[in-house]
Image (cartoon, rainbow, N blue to C red):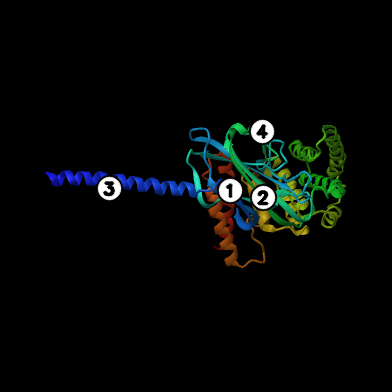
């Protein structure tokens, strides 16, 4: 009996010391966790099918809710140019709305996340890669770029990186990185901005008229694009003035395009000489949006756009990825065999093995899209699959 009592006492002593040890170890872990921090490097990352230079943001430290319970919220990432030191930071623009603040052009990325009362990352963990090619920097050359990450509940509102209602803020950190910006900055583009706008609009109008008709849906795409350009001005009167100027230019040149009086060769020549790489890609994306506006891909439109890609020395794989995004939403109309091959990256210089390999890859990609919940996407995917099957038969794959 005495042995049993001693054993029981010994057991509770062991549990006490074990519990104390666990608490001590837990306390040591907690004390070793730093406050929220971010780290940023420039690295190549696979974005879609293309390796792309990105700002890779990592995080570590406490990432926890301060509201007393676990809540849903957001990381909010902003980027600014601070090269000029004591002067106010210059905003970085985004080319895509999903990477922009509510006004549609200043970079501001929201990443939804759940925040727990004891959440933390002890070691560096990937937060997000941001492709550099979606950003428009203010100036060319060696620039110091500030990256700021804040996080909080869904009610947190951030403007230009500054929380507007700090009661919903859980944490924040900022860091900077030096970048070599190769392209012309948007503040330096004022000299050739007008040329870019006009050349891109004329090229888009030629694309719209490639099938011998200018549909209202195509015209609306060009008008909406020009309207967004006008918003780079901060003063409302300048925005409205620029909108009117561009709308007038569109009306004037729409008539010329319909009458085949716009010269493609001259437009491409000026683009090669005067536009930055980003401006050329922006012009290409406008052409692709015009192509997709009426939900039909005409052979004449596709041929014109492919010629433009070659003439402007743009990356074909990147172009194909941009086009595939639109192809998933539009109907395929009047496509000849030679054109259908180009849709899938097939050209006459490829060997039979290379053609079959690419067609197998394309078949797998479009088969995946055929399971989409969107009936239109499923329909487009099946059209593409049928075309691939015919091409595989033609090439004896």
**Nearer the N terminus, badge 2 or badge 1?**
1
What's the residue at 60%, 56% (across, down)? Answer: 45
- Element under disc 2: helix
- Callout 4 environment at 10 Å: few (<14), some (14 to 19), or many (20+)? few
Q: Can residue 49 be seen in this snapshot? A: no
Residue nearest the observer in this picture, 38 or 91: 38
Q: Which one is closest to the eye, mark 3 or mark 2?
A: 3
- Element under disc 4: loop
**Nearer the N terminus, badge 1 or badge 4?**
1
Q: Which residue bears the numbered disc 4? A: 164
Q: Which one is closest to the eye, mark 3 or mark 1?
A: 3
Q: Which residue bears the numbered disc 3? A: 14
CB contact under 8 Å: marks 2 and 1: no
- Element under disc 1: strand
- Callout 1 environment at 10 Å: few (<14), some (14 to 19), or many (20+)? some
* Residue 37 marker: 1
Q: Can residue 97 be seen in this snapshot? A: yes
**Nearer the N terminus, badge 3 or badge 2?**
3
Q: CA distance from mark 3 to mark 2?
A: 68 Å
CB contact under 8 Å: marks 3 and 1: no
Q: CA distance from mark 3 to mark 1?
A: 39 Å
Q: CA distance from mark 1 to mark 4?
A: 21 Å
Q: Quadrant of residue 241?
A: top right
Q: Which one is closest to the eye, mark 3 or mark 4?
A: 3
Residue nearest the observer in this picture, 16 or 337: 16
Q: Which residue bears the numbered disc 2? A: 323
Q: Quadrant of the N terminus?
A: top left
Q: Residue furthest left?
A: 1
Residue nearest the observer in this picture, 169 or 280: 169
Q: Quadrant of residue 152?
A: top right
Q: Quadrant of the C terminus?
A: bottom right
- Left or right side of 304 for 348: left
């Amino acid at each position: 009996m005495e042995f049993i009592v001693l054993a029981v006492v010994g057991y509770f002593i062991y549990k006490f010391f074990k519990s104390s040890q666990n608490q001590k170890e837990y306390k040591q872990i907690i004390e070793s966790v730093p406050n929220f921090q971010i780290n940023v490097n420039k690295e190549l990352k696979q974005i879609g099918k293309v390796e792309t230079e990105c700002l890779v943001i990592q995080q570590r430290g406490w990432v926890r809710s301060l509201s007393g319970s676990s809540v849903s919220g957001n990381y909010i990432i902003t980027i600014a140019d601070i090269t000029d030191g004591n002067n106010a930071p210059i905003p970085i623009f985004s080319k895509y709305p999903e990477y922009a603040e509510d006004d549609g052009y200043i970079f501001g990325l929201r990443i939804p996340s759940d925040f727990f009362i004891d959440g933390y990352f002890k070691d560096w963990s990937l937060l997000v890669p941001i492709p550099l090619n979606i950003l428009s920097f203010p100036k060319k050359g060696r620039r110091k770029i500030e990256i700021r990450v804040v996080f909080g509940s869904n009610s947190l509102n951030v403007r230009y990186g500054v929380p507007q209602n700090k009661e919903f803020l859980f944490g924040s950190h900022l860091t900077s990185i030096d970048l070599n910006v190769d392209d012309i900055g948007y503040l330096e583009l004022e000299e050739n901005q007008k040329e870019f706008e006009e050349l891109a609009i004329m090229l888009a109008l030629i694309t719209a008229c490639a099938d011998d008709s200018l549909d209202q849906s195509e015209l609306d795409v060009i008008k909406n694009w020009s309207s967004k350009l006008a918003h780079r001005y901060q003063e409302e009167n300048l925005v409205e003035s620029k909108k009117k100027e561009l709308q007038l230019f569109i009306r004037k040149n729409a008539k010329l395009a319909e009458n085949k009086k716009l010269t493609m060769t001259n437009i491409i020549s000026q683009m090669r000489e005067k536009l930055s790489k980003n401006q050329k890609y922006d012009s290409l994306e406008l052409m692709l949006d015009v192509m997709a506006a009426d939900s039909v891909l005409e052979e004449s439109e596709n041929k014109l756009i492919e010629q433009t890609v070659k003439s402007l020395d743009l990356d074909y794989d990147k172009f194909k990825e941009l086009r595939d995004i639109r192809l998933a939403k539009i109907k395929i109309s009047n496509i000849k065999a030679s054109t259908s091959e180009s849709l899938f990256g097939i050209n006459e210089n490829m060997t039979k093995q290379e053609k079959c390999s690419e067609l197998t890859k394309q078949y797998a990609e479009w088969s995946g899209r055929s399971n989409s919940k969107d009936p239109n996407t499923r329909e487009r995917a099946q059209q593409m699959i049928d075309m691939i099957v015919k091409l595989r038969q033609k090439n004896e794959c």
